[in-house]
Amino acid sequence: MKEKIEAIKAAVRDQINKTEALQDVQDIRVKYLGKKGELTAVMKELGKLSKEERPAVGQLVNTARAKIEAALADRMEELKQHEMEQKIQSEKIDITLPGRKPVLGHMHPLHLTRRCMENAFLKMGFSIAEGPEIEDDYYNFQCLNFPDDHPARDMQDSMYITDKILLRTHTSPMQARTLQAHNPNEPVKVIVPGKVYRWDYDATHSPVFHQMEGLIVDKGIRFSDLKGMLEDFLREIFGPKTKVRFRASFFPFTEPSAEVDISCVMCGGKGCRVCSHTGWLEILGCGMVHPNVLRLNGYDPDKVSGFAFGMGVERIAMLKYGIDDLRLFYEDDMRFLNQF
């Protein structure tokens, strides 16, 4: 029995010296000290010994077990330390190397376009006004010369929340809100950028899109003022060689009204697929503020006059950057957005 215990101790020492991983040490523990281990088996044979031999052999087994556990614990600690040193070396950082620059974001093309448009108007003395996107029918239609049965209401596919509350279909309600908030004897000169909502979705329409409204009301405002201001604006956005033309049109809140075209930004007015070979691209609508709109909002059309205009920010951006599908602005495709 004594020889067997010594043989186990020697075998354990030899195997511990050959271990290279924590699992190897654990395997030795199970092999010799586990429930079915070799030293445990020796312990179970003590009952076969005489009363005189049993204490001495039991003492040898306990001593051997303690030494084996201590040797295993020491080797386990050595291997843990070795693994830690290897991990430190593998994860070592050379602080002399240049750092990794964080990826910086940038402005969305619609925000770039909106800011460019705002800056152009701010230089002309306009101020910026903003209003609610959930609007009352009173401001969205009635104050802008849209009675309940007006056919122009059919031109706009509106998103109603209740019979009288809707998501605004244009930024024009801010014309009424701005006029009613001002003293009729004081001039008004504002632009109104913001989101609007309609039931449209295709390559050139979105149910959510952006408009920029403009309004001037004062004494002696003429259509020629509107024409000159819009020509200056469009040439600043699209370049000094841009040609501008006005075509008679209809809007309920302006009279007379006009559609404004610019020479095609793709072909320079020569005619191409983008402009349907006409050389012109429709860009915005405008006109002199309708006398009824002035009256509905507390102004006397015999004393003051004004003009208003409105345009889509997406439309400007598509022409400015040569984009052929409006939906690209809203799909969050980084391959598209990283170009700006």
Image (cartoon, grey):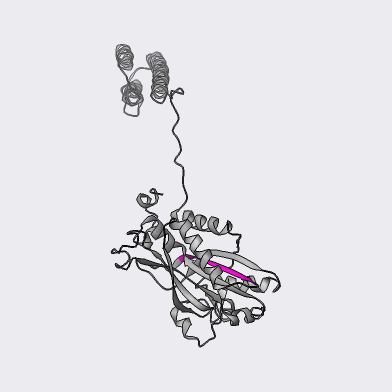
Q: Nearer the viewer, residue 173 or 119?
A: 119
The residue under the point 59% across, 73% down is 306
Q: Can the viewer see residue 146?
A: yes
Q: Residue furthest bottom?
A: 149
Numbered label tally? 0
Quarter assignment of residue 279: bottom left
Quarter assignment of residue 207: bottom left
Q: In the rendered view, does 189 fall on the left or right side of 86?
A: right
Q: At which x and y percent is residue 285?
A: 47, 71
Q: Can the viewer see residue 194?
A: no
Magenta stretch: give its range.
209-218
Q: In the rendered view, does 10 fall on the left or right side of 231?
A: left
- In this view, 72 is above or below 207: above
- Locate the N terminus and report the quarter of the image it occupies: top left
Magenta segment, prevailing SS (helix, strand or loop): strand
The residue under the point 63% across, 70% down is 178
Q: At which x and y percent is residue 239?
A: 43, 55
Q: At which x and y percent is residue 81?
A: 42, 20
Q: At which x and y percent is residue 310?
A: 50, 69
Within the magenta stretch, is there residue 215? Answer: yes
The residue under the point 46% across, 46% down is 105
Within the magenta stretch, is there residue 189? Answer: no
Q: Nearer the viewer, residue 256 or 215?
A: 256
Q: In the rendered view, does 294 fall on the left or right side of 332?
A: right
Q: Nearer the viewer, residue 142 or 136?
A: 142
